[in-house]
Image: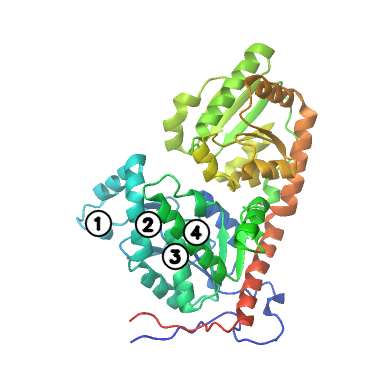
């Protein structure tokens, strides 16, 4: 027997001109997060969502997510109700607070092989050419199978006032929009990368996937009561492309965790890179390392770059990067140690690839770690295309130097001037810290985020022409 969708909200959902219920910061809409990754401490989008929702009442927050193979343990200090929907459609409720990866459980293995199944899946995901051909099928399965009905069932059980969706690929966008539209649930869309246009550019059958991605994203935006980008750069472009207004929220940072005072000088200019080496970023870091070696040899500048990343990426790229003393491999650091490492640096490095396909992929992105770099009060040096989102944000904040792929002498000259000018580096660091305190500080940022979701919910109450009632499929 089908039964109607009737939310049991923390807040009153009836239409009317009554006084706003959001004057009390403790009274927030019941939100279900829908995304590809869980709220967590050790993955970029998970860290991003954690920074936004930390402190949200647990009884008013839940999450449904759709990993393809391997995901990370959700942070139960933020949210107490996580539901992982596997490709088979099985729903896994996550219990316990242990950190680390979760592989697809044994029950999803038709052969019952358990660990061998996980090894097979992991092996496939490490083979880019094979994944390139498998991905169209995976996307079609997610977008057109019974997974939408399963998502609807979870939403009916959770009864949110609002769905917050961190969208990227076509299939997640279609699933989320279709479920919210069918059930009449208000939607808030957040986007961190321009995957709508870039994700499918190089994969087989790209044209129909790009067309579908654009079509379903426009439908999701049209249904949404609120839309947000990752930066003002992306918000401005999306205003023009999809209609606005778009707001923006980046990763929020605890200002007190970072000490912006200059470190004691010791005659060495210390540079630090902490982050992902994928998307050909390691190549840009290797070019920067070569430039540092040249300045050491030709100008006697003692500048040392230390690279921190995940163990698998270090193992993959260590031979191409390590060149002591100019470039050293620092290994992996837990997030709580990053503020101390950043404090002991003079320059924090961000790298992006000059490869056109990779640059298109990151064109409107704003890296998670740049919020941390800015808050650390250190000069930021970016080596990569100077017209992409992260570079434009560094320029907007006056937080550092962006070096593009110009001729060798110009690159070496700009880098040399930065390394010998301590006053300029401190000025850049002060600018970045000031920008971070305005836009990335966690307490004020969460209040702005809560207000944005509250306003989206209130807008849905004013627009009650769309009934908040629908039937679950029998």
Q: Is residue 198 above or below residue 15?
A: above
Would you name the residue on which mark 4 appears? 214
Name the foreground residue: 365 vs 27.
Answer: 365
Name the foreground residue: 178 vs 164.
Answer: 178
Image marks 2 and 4: residues in contact by CB distance under 8 Å: no
Label located before the other in sequence (2 or 1): 1
Would you name the residue on which mark 1 appears? 109
- Determine whether, in the image, residue 235 is placed left or right of residue 45: right
Label located before the other in sequence (3 or 2): 2
In the image, which disc is placed on residue 174? Answer: 3
Image marks 3 and 4: residues in contact by CB distance under 8 Å: no
Residue 9, image quadrant: bottom right
Label located before the other in sequence (3 or 4): 3
| Distance from the alpha carbon under mark 3 to that under mark 4 | 10 Å
Residue 454, image quadrant: bottom right
- Determine whether, in the image, residue 312 is placed left or right of residue 371: left
From the top left corner, tell me how far across and down residue 430 is, in percent: 77, 40
Label located before the other in sequence (2 or 4): 2
> Is the residue marked by circle 2 packed among few (<14), some (14-19), or many (20+) residues within 10 Å?
some
| Distance from the alpha carbon under mark 2 to that under mark 4 | 14 Å
Judge depth for marks 2 and 4 and give the one in front. 4
From the top left corner, tell me how far across and down residue 415 is, in percent: 68, 25
Label located before the other in sequence (3 or 1): 1
From the top left corner, tell me how far across and down residue 252 is, in percent: 64, 54
């Amino acid at each position: 027997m089908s039964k109607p969708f009737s939310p049991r909200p923390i807040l009153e959902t009836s239409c009317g001109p009554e006084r706003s219920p959001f004057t009390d910061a403790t009274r927030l809409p019941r939100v279900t997060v829908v995304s590809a990754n869980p709220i967590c401490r050790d993955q970029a989008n998970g860290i991003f969502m954690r920074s936004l929702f930390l402190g949200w009442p647990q009884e008013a927050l839940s999450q449904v997510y759709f990993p393809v193979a391997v995901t990370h343990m959700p942070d139960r200090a933020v949210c107490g109700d996580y539901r992982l929907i596997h490709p088979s459609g099985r729903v896994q409720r996550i219990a316990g607070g242990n950190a680390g990866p979760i592989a697809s459980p044994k029950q999803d293995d038709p052969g019952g092989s358990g660990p061998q199944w996980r090894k097979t899946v992991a092996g496939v995901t490490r083979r880019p050419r094979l994944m390139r051909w498998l991905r169209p099928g995976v996307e079609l399965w997610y977008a057109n199978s019974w997974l939408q009905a399963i998502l609807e069932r979870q939403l009916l059980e959770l009864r949110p006032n609002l769905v917050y969706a961190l969208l990227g690929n076509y299939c997640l966008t279609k699933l989320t929009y279709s479920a919210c539209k069918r059930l009449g649930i208000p939607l808030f869309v957040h986007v961190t990368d321009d995957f709508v246009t870039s994700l499918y550019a190089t994969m087989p059958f790209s044209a129909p996937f790009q067309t579908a991605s654009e079509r379903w994203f426009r439908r999701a935006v049209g249904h949404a009561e609120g839309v947000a980008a990752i930066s003002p750069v992306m918000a401005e472009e999306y205003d023009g492309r999809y209609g606005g207004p778009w707001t923006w929220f980046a990763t929020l940072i605890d200002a007190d965790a970072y000490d912006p005072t200059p470190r004691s000088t010791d005659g060495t200019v210390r540079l630090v890179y902490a982050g992902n080496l994928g998307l050909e970023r390691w190549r840009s870091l290797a070019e920067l390392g070569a430039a540092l070696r040249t300045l050491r040899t030709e100008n006697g500048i003692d500048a040392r770059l230390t690279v921190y990343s995940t163990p698998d990426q270090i193992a993959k790229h260590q031979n191409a990067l390590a060149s002591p003393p100019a470039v050293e491999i620092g290994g992996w650091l837990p997030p709580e140690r990053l503020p101390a490492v950043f404090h002991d640096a003079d320059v924090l490095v961000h790298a992006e690839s000059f490869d056109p396909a990779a640059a298109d992929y990151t064109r409107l992105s704003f890296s998670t770690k740049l919020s941390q770099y800015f808050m650390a009060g250190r000069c930021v040096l970016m080596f990569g295309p100077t017209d992409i989102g992260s570079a434009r944000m560094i320029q907007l904040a006056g937080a550092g130097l962006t070096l593009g792929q110009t001729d060798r002498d110009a690159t070496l000259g700009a880098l040399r001037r930065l390394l010998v000018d301590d006053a300029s580096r401190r000025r850049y660091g002060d600018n970045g810290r000031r920008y971070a305190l305005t836009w990335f500080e966690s307490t004020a940022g969460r209040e702005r985020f809560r207000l944005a979701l509250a306003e989206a919910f209130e807008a849905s109450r004013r627009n009650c022409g769309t009934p908040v009632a629908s039937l679950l499929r029998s």
